[in-house]
Amino acid sequence: MRKYLSCVILIILCIACAMIFYVNANEFIPSGNTSSDTMSDSESSLDTDKNTTDAIKIATIENEGTIISERLTDTNLRIEYAMYKLENEGNLYLSCEMYIDAKSPIANEAKGYLSVNGTKKEFTLTKMIGTSTLLCSITSSIEFKEAEKINIEGFLDIDISDSNGVVLDSLKANGTIVASESYGKMPTSYLINMEHISQYPDLPSGDEITSLAMVLNYLGYEADKNELCDLYLDKGPVGFTSFYEANVGNPRNAYNSYGCLAPVIVKASNRFTEVNGGKHTAYDLTSYSLDALLYEVASGNPVIVWACEDFDITPSISRIWVVDGQNLYLKSNMATMVLVGYDLINNTVTLSDPAGSIFEIDMSLFETRFLEMGSYAVVVK
């Protein structure tokens, strides 16, 4: 009887303990309704964060690059620019920073300005300038217009002599970029099919005028390189001629002939097309960004560019002439050719070289040498 009673009591105690445990457990384990409410609050919190993120206008880079001075000494002026666009806005924001790059510190007083479309920001420095020192920065809000030209200019007034003995009284860096959404619509690669023309043997130093002959023939003209050289290209004696005004020497000569720059080729091209009844016009694209040149190629327009004979060699000043009171710096390793293609995936450009053949080269290396040579370019369209 006692054993039976003990068992009954034990069973009652177990039931009581189980009930106590169940009640306490309910204080910690949420019911089905409570769990649903908690998840709803979490979702609500996530939605709030998402809405906050959407409300922030995200800036995307539309265009960026570098503009450098043309002196090609060990002291240069450099402008870094980036064009931003905010989501759901038509305005572009252009940010520019100007630096002085020097192998050794400069102790002179310096002053100058940074300008965007004529709006200048001036600066004065009286302390030592070291390597890659920031001189000035400017940010401009630009109302977006398709294919709008934006002129960037930097100027530094300073008297210095670099390690090569080249005396500089000032440095100037200027360039033109194009505000365009069309760059985003460009194909990832494009190649213009055009005939290659060699400058040899008749024009051993005539890469500029031969490049023009290639472009004019692509446009449907019967343009002979020799005829272009003899009848349409301005030429002048070495030491007395500015390569902005005429070809320095005669391209028919292998020696003592130093070529010309973009304005001379523009003039020769427009003379030719006018005489031959064409509707095409040559335009000077000097200092335009590489994006702008690639956009021309994607539009079917080959671009004459001033680059390098050997892209592995950094250009430098080889001779200095004074013509009409202006110092003219002749750059070694310069060569003119035609930009006929690009590949954005493989980061290459295709060039037709009148002194060689059609070849591909790394786009970044090409842009570096193109900038170092002064960013000279011509398009005929």
Image (cartoon, rainbow, N blue to C red):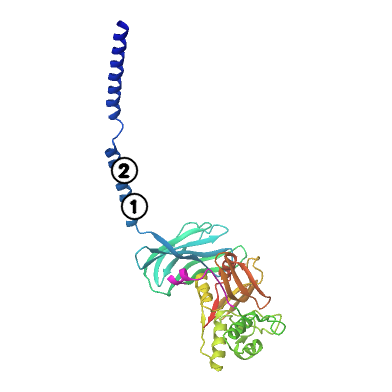
Q: Secondary structure at mark 2?
A: helix
Distance in Å between CA atoms under marks 2 and 1: 17 Å
Taking depth in this image into account, of 116 and 136 the one nearest to the observer is 116
Res 227 → quadrant: bottom right
Q: Which residue is mark 1?
A: 50
Q: Is 148 above or below relative to 30?
A: below
Percent x, y of residue 282: 52, 84
User: 303 and 49: which one is in front?
Assistant: 49
Instruction: Give above or below for 49 relative to 338.
Output: above
The answer, for residue 225, to whether it is visible in the render is: yes
Magenta segment: 177-192
Q: Secondary structure at mark 1?
A: helix
The image quadrant of residue 265 is: bottom right
Q: Kindly identify the residue that appears in the image at 62 percent across and 68 percent down.
A: 361
Q: Is residue 5 magenta?
A: no
Read off the residue under disc 2. Answer: 39
Mark 2 residue type:
Met
| Residue at 66% in and 88% down | 226
Instruction: Provide residue 307's location: percent of width, then percent of height.
Output: 60, 72
